[in-house]
Amino acid sequence: MKRVINLIFLMMATQMIIAQEADPYQWLEEVEAPKALEWVEEWNDKSIGVISSQPGYNDIYEKNLDILNSTDRIANPGIYGKYVYNFWQDQQYQRGIWRRAELKSYLSGTPDWEILLNIDELSKKDDVKWVFKGASGLYPDYNKFLVTLSKGGGDAAIVKEFDVQSKAFVENGFFLPEAKGGASWIDENTLLVSTDFGDGVTTSGYPMQVKIWKRGTKLENAQEVYKGLETDMGIWGYAQQNPEKVYQLITRRTSFYSGDYLFIENGKAVKLDLPDDIELNTIFNGQVIFQLKSAWDVNNKSFQQGAVISIDYNDLLNGKRNFELVVEPGERSSITQISNTKDRLLVNMLENVKSELYSFRFENKWEKEKINAPDFGNISLGSTDEFSNKFFFYFQNFLEPSTLYFGDASSGEISKVKSLPSWFPTEKYEVQQFEAVSKDGTHIPYFVAHRKSMKLDGNNPTLLYAYGGFEIPQLPRYSAATGVSWLEKGGVYVLANLRGGGEFGPQWHQAGLKENRQLVFNDFHAVAEDLIERKITSSKKLGIYGGSNGGLLVGVAFTQRPDLYNAAVCAVPLLDMKRYNKLLAGASWMAEYGNPDIPEEWEYIKKYSPYQNVKKGMDYPEVFFTTSTRDDRVHPGHARKMVAKMNDLGYKIYYFENTEGGHAGASTNEQRAKMNALIYSYLQMKLMD
């Protein structure tokens, strides 16, 4: 009997401990639950009521809407055959139109557009808030496309076959139901598909199988060519249509940064013998192009971390190891983009966070030529023509609006197609690049855009933006919204290049992974302190802004160093790092942050996780949290729970949750203008007298 009583007491004690550790706000993770949505509506009404009543809110909204709807915007081109395709949103087409014009007409400056699909009309017809997510064409004629549509902007989407000649979806054509997956053309009657086939998905919510699907057959009867594990991050198939061959590839990601590549030959998957962290970029003229994330010694050659290498497709398939070096970045440089035209490989490189563009050709060895692109800014590659060496690229910096160029990779000639108008007088401003010294002595570069007349008196309202993760570089870019809503109001804008990003290659990213994550946060604090030390601003006048992983950064920043910041915009954030891997796509990011279910890894995660570290009696800034109900990548529960917890702890905060928009936070220009107006009105309210 005594043993039974002891057992009962033990069970009761265990239940009490579990109850103490239980999250009282976890009910807010039920995204569409009526109680949760009622909570969202109350917070939206309360926060919008305060922020939208600020002087200048309506002016910011109207100016942002004018910018977003402007007909002077660049119609971003996508080359398919002799046509340029473009997706366009404006005041008339709020959800947008998908259209095309002949390349010659597009380059004339007054394109004769042919509307193919009106998303506003489709949404009305289907009674669904469709968001256009792109389209992939059937090589070489491009008369058929696979159009991807999302409900409200989430990552999960449907795929439907579309005929551009009849401007209609193909009756009884290919159709994939809603899932986080996709398909690509092998030929007119065959697709390579990775989706939820009804057998389940990975723990990250991504496809677990790749199948070949023939027209006229049921999706569930498609031929399986590869099946991964539930614990994999995801399995994706992709067909690349080249003149010499339709290459069929499978990517198996065991984590965000590691996995396997397989080629499909004769309907069977052949695994390639490669480092597990190598990245396959493209297949170009029979050469498979890779980028190394770690140094590699192979076949008596040594390739450095970050290098781009190549090998003949058939040689690789047959187990040969005769890799060739394409290009190797230096200590303060990195490779941001790789693309190709008919017979040129285009490589976009960063040199101390400034872009340089190169063209490579292969004739038994790689030969390099620099494209005469503009200097001292941010180059981004656009669409390329697979039938010629023509390509589009963009150039911009903080004070120079984005300009679209049309280039010839074989001759090196470029011509300006169109420039965005400047929405604010950039001649009044200048940009400086400084370096802060982080806690461990690492030099962290950052840019400061400000009026030429700025006084170094510590009294300048300053907005610090950063990301610091997933090897994504933060580059100088022209933002009309920031110009008219912040700089023109007397603000200073700062962009920081923290470790964890991709500004200086894989090593810069890897320096901030997992147990080293605190280094990223230290970098951010160091930039803030450096701004204050230079008397550009003061803690009273300093605000911070970040989204997604940058939202986590902001959450850590204000909980660790509330003394540095007086405003914080925490957008679509991760905040509960104890449960992040159980929410939506969270499990896929464990290679970045670590696994909180492993005690040794939770030991370092728990030290910075904002949701676990927020506490009573601190002098936190009045944070503005934003998210989206339709965000199916970063769960809106992160922001919801943090707001509820901070409110119960007695803190004044603001919260806005858009009911659609996905991880981008907005789907229409009206929604984007509203979001910008809320953010900048909040910042002005907190940082400007």
Image (cartoon, grey):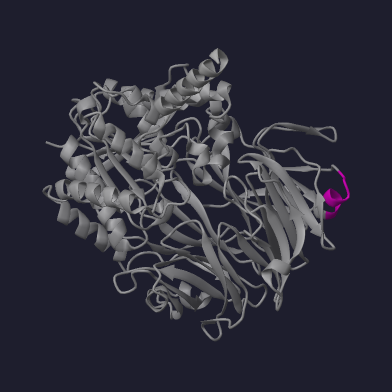
Residue at 65% from the left image edge and 36% from the top image edge = 293
Residue 216 left/right relative to 78: right
- Residue 639 on the magenta segment: no
- The vertical placement of 648 against 118, above or below, is above
Position of residue 399 measured from the top left corner of the image (x, y, whole percent): 33, 47
The quadrant the C terminus occupies is top left
Residue 477 left/right relative to 53: right
Position of residue 344 measured from the top left corner of the image (x, y, whole percent): 67, 57
The quadrant where residue 26 appears: top left
Q: How many labels, in total?
A: 0
Residue 659 left/right relative to 581: left
The span picked out in magenta is 314-320
Viewer-nearest residue: 103 or 254: 254
Query: Which residue of the protein is positioned furthest toward the front in this rendering?
Result: 1
The quadrant the N terminus occupies is top right
- The vertical placement of 586 against 109, above or below, is above
Viewer-nearest residue: 458 or 433: 458
Any part of residue 645 in sight: yes
Position of residue 303 measured from the top left corner of the image (x, y, whole percent): 73, 34
- Residue 316 on the magenta segment: yes
Any part of residue 523 in sight: no
Residue at 33% from the left image edge and 67% from the top image edge = 72
Position of residue 173 measured from the top left corner of the image (x, y, whole percent): 62, 78
The quadrant where residue 248 appears: bottom right
- The vertical placement of 662 against 535, above or below, is below
Query: Which residue of the protein is positioned furthest toward the top in this rendering?
Result: 2
Residue at 69% from the left image edge and 41% from the top image edge = 278
